[in-house]
Image (cartoon, rainbow, N blue to C red):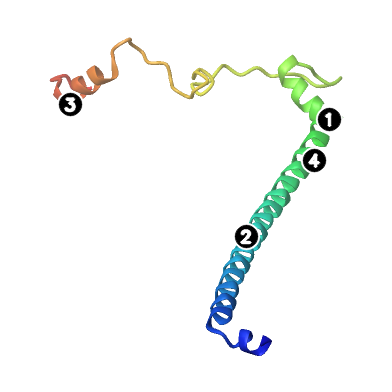
Amino acid sequence: MLRDYLKSKSFVTFGVILLLVMGYLFSKELNRRYRISREIGALNEEIAKYSDKNQELSQLIDYLETPEYQERQARPLLNLQKPGEFAVAFPPSAVEEQDPMGAVPSESAVSNYRQWWDYFFSSKVK
């Protein structure tokens, strides 16, 4: 009786369906694990990148806290001198007269398009 049931079409069909469902679930689990391992790898790379950046910033902080750096920054900002040194003042150059964005102040308040128009269509030779 058991042998007949094992050889029946309903048992074989049920077994094949069960194997297909288990195969599908197994492949789904493998896919999930693969995606998770890829994400872990990407996060480990990001951790390494930020760790390197953190180390660089720590070294920069250590350098900025050194007396040599503080002295080098304080001397021009505060016009400090060491004993025996003398300061020389130069007249400001055109580069120093620029605004913080790097643009040289214009000589007139004429708009840019008007200056180009005058450049191409003006009869004056400059």
What's the CA distance linking mark 2 and mark 3? 66 Å
On the image, numbered disc 2 is attached to which residue?
Answer: 32
Q: Nearer the viewer, mark 4 or mark 3?
A: 4
What's the mark number on residue 59? 4
Instruction: Please state which amino acid type lies under the numbered disc 3.
Output: Phe
Disc 2 is placed on an element classified as helix
Neighbours of disc 4 within 10 Å: few (<14), some (14-19), many (20+): few
Instruction: Please state which amino acid type lies under the numbered disc 1.
Output: Glu
Relative to 31, does residue 124 appear above or below in the rendering? above
Q: Earlier in the sequence, mark 1 or mark 3?
A: 1
The residue nearer to you, when weighing 75 against 85, is: 75
Q: Earlier in the sequence, mark 2 or mark 4?
A: 2
Neighbours of disc 3 within 10 Å: few (<14), some (14-19), many (20+): few
Q: Residue 88 is drawn in which quadrant?
A: top right
Q: Measured from the top left, where is residue 95 in percent x and y?
A: 51, 24
View extreme (front): residue: 1
Q: Measured from the top left, where is residue 10 in percent x and y?
A: 54, 79
What's the CA distance linking mark 2 and mark 4? 40 Å
What's the residue at 65%, 57% (across, down)? 36
Q: Earlier in the sequence, mark 1 or mark 2?
A: 2
On the image, numbered disc 3 is attached to which residue?
Answer: 120
What's the CA distance linking mark 1 and mark 2? 49 Å
Neighbours of disc 1 within 10 Å: few (<14), some (14-19), many (20+): few
